[in-house]
């Protein structure tokens, strides 16, 4: 085992981890980042780093022998297929009542997500993070996050004419005819690049359906933003295919135990590092699982009883609508959604008009709704099984279905259309078995203080989506980034 001492160790390379590493390094601190997934910097046999959604292969899923696509069926037929087991990019992590999709690799969720970069409306901020000063967030930290992430907007004139957003224009028309407010959603996709894709002057990525298993060109993942600045500091080392399994107090700080993995997911070496400060940024699920286990098994017994609590799914629920033959949604669909239907104030739902990039005309409109739901689950240590359980129940999604219906029942009735029943199984309307937006498990100002310092252990911090109590009202990564910027600024000013 390596005997090493580092001033700061960051667990995970998603949004929270990348923000922490950059600001610490800029403040002169040497940082070691540990990431269980792969580096995603080397092309595969096809010359591309990332696989396409239409042709999943071993790169696509984290340690599965069969794909587990969010849309499991099409026209009633199952579409999942066998793949070699590999440390691929998308983890569909199964708990008893829900499958939680997450990115695995250097860049975390930014590798696989839709790139929708939404700052919540100011009037809703109090229901997201009630103990955080909204003025500071909206004057300083949201603008900082938006600038660093490279958030930009589609050119409206291009949206109105391009074949690739026919599906979103149909979604807008139907929203308008039922009097729902619609909004253009900012994204981290480089819109100039997408226009060049459409013009045929650059290699295509959004316009050939790349998204869930990575995007080869136009999306500004963290690899192109925060993590490229992280590398430029020269103060940060990143260890991919290394998983943190233990953190406990030791002379000089904390002893961190790390397993090195091969691409089959098997541990091939165990390493120990002593770190003066440890930043948990393994994502809502990853951080919660670690903290709950470490408290229960005696490594960090003084963590308080809030650890593992307050987990929510951001109210995610999916559905499709079957359009009439005179409303085709297009054979070519950009994989980056950019239109939302906002019925939050009236019905508790914000719905994205999402693509179905199948390459054929489907006459379907597809939506991911973010809804208002009070249901919160808890992570607990299951000693018999040696793993962490989550108390989520599938029936809790009924609140979200009802909120989504405030939009789609009305649109269906106005348009004389019906729900699709073939996308999530045989005769199943709602995609209520999953979330893309895990949040909570180490809630700010409960499990930690109001800046992410874990109660009970000076020098341990939480930096990621686990700080947020279950909902961000819109898509979460801008809020996760902005909150991390706020917290790390305070920690650098007062704890170093
Ligand atoms: P994040 O999950 O990004 O990073 C955690 C990292 O830690 C991962 O790389 C993980 O492998 C690593 N890790 C975990 N345990 C570890 C351990 N023990 N040791 C070492 N490393 C460990 N959001 C949004 O705002 N707009 C959008 O359009 C979308 N779309 C979307 C689509 C899909 C398919 C998904 C799965 C998700 C989205 N999201 C999204 C959600 C968004 O990606 C998510 O909220 C953020 O990535 C969460 O950021 P964090 O920093 O909390 O963790």
Image (spheres, rainbow, N blue to C red):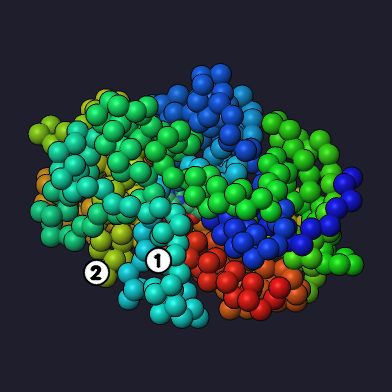
The image shows residue 366 at horizontal and vertical percentages of 29, 42
- Contact flag, marks 2 and 1 (Cβ < 8 Å): no
The kind of secondary structure element at disc 2 is helix
- Please state the horizontal and vertical placement of residue 113, each as a whole percent of the image: 45, 46
Horizontal placement of 205 versus 455: left or right?
A: left
Quadrant where the image shows the N terminus: top right
Q: At x 26% / y 48%, what residue is drawn? A: 154
Residue at left offset 47%, top offset 74%? 129
Asked whether 153 or 115 is in front, the reply is 153
Query: Residue 237 at x, y = what percent?
Result: 70, 48
Find the distance from the CA under tag 2 to the CA under tag 1: 28 Å
Residue at x 19% of width, y 33% of height: 163
Residue 381 visible to the viewer: no
Q: Is residue 42 visible?
A: yes
Q: Read off the residue under disc 1.
A: 143
Q: Residues within 10 Å of mark 2 (few under 14, many from 20)?
A: few
Q: Quadrant of residue 151?
A: bottom left
Sequence-wise, which precedes: disc 2 or disc 1? 1
Residue marked by disc 2: 346
Please name whichever residue, 232 or 388, is drawn nearer the observer in this view of the structure: 232
276 lies left or right of 467 = right
Q: Is residue 466 above or below residue 429?
A: below
Q: Secondary structure at mark 1?
A: helix
Above or below 67: residue 367: below
| Picture residue at 70% right of the left edge, 62% below the top | 29
Q: Which of the 4 image quarters holds residue 122?
A: bottom left
The quarter in which the C terminus is drawn is: bottom right
Q: Nearer the viewer, mark 2 or mark 1?
A: 1
Q: Is residue 478 left or right of residue 200?
A: right
**207, 218: nearer the viewer:** 218
Q: Position of residue 371 (x, y in %)?
A: 36, 61
Of the pair 355 and 281, the residue shown nearer to us: 281
């Amino acid at each position: 085992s390596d005997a090493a001492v580092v001033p700061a160790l960051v667990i995970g390379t998603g949004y929270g981890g990348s923000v922490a590493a950059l600001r610490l390094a800029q403040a002169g601190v040497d940082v070691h980042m540990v990431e269980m997934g792969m580096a995603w910097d080397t092309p595969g046999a096809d010359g591309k780093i990332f696989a396409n959604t239409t042709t999943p292969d071993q790169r696509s899923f984290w340690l599965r022998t069969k794909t587990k696509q969010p849309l499991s069926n099409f026209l009633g037929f199952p579409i999942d297929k066998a793949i070699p087991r590999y440390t691929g990019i998308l983890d569909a992590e199964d708990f008893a009542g829900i499958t939680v999709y997450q990115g695995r690799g250097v860049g975390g969720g930014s590798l696989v997500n839709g790139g929708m970069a939404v700052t919540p409306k100011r009037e809703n901020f109090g229901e997201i993070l009630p103990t955080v000063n909204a003025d500071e967030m909206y004057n300083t930290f949201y603008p900082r996050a938006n600038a660093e992430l490279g958030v930009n907007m589609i050119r409206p004139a291009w949206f109105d004419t391009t074949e690739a957003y026919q599906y979103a224009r149909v979604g807008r028309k139907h929203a308008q005819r039922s009097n729902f407010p619609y909004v253009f959603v900012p994204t981290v996709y480089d819109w100039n690049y997408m226009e060049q894709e459409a013009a045929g002057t650059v290699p295509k990525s959004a316009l050939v359906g790349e998204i869930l298993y990575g995007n080869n060109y136009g999306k500004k993942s963290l690899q192109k933003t925060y993590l490229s600045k992280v590398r430029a500091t020269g103060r940060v080392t990143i260890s991919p295919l290394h998983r943190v399994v233990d953190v406990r107090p030791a002379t000089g700080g904390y002893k961190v135990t790390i397993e090195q993995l091969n691409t089959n997911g098997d541990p091939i070496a165990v390493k120990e590092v002593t770190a003066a400060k440890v930043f948990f940024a393994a994502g809502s699920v990853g951080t919660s699982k670690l903290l709950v286990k470490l408290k229960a098994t005696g490594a960090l017994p003084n963590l308080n009883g809030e650890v593992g609590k307050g987990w929510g799914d951001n109210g995610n629920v999916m559905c499709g609508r079957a359009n009439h033959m005179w409303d085709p949604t297009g054979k070519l669909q950009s994989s980056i959604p950019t239109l939302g239907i906002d019925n939050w104030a009236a019905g508790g739902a914000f719905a994205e008009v999402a693509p179905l990039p199948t390459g054929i005309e489907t006459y379907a409109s597809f939506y991911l709704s973010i809804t208002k739901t009070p249901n919160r689950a808890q992570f607990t240590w299951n000693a018999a099984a040696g793993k962490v359980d989550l108390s989520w129940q599938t029936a809790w999604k009924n609140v979200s279905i009802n909120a989504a219906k405030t939009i789609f029942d009305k649109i269906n009735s106005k348009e004389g259309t019906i729900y699709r029943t073939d996308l999530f199984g045989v005769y199943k309307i709602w995609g209520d078995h999953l979330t893309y937006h895990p949040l909570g498990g180490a809630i700010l100002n409960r499990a930690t203080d109001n800046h992410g310092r874990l109660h009970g252990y000076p020098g341990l911090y939480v930096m990621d989506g686990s700080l947020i109590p279950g909902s961000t009202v819109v898509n979460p990564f801008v809020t996760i980034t902005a909150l991390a910027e706020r917290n790390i600024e305070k920690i650098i000013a007062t704890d170093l």
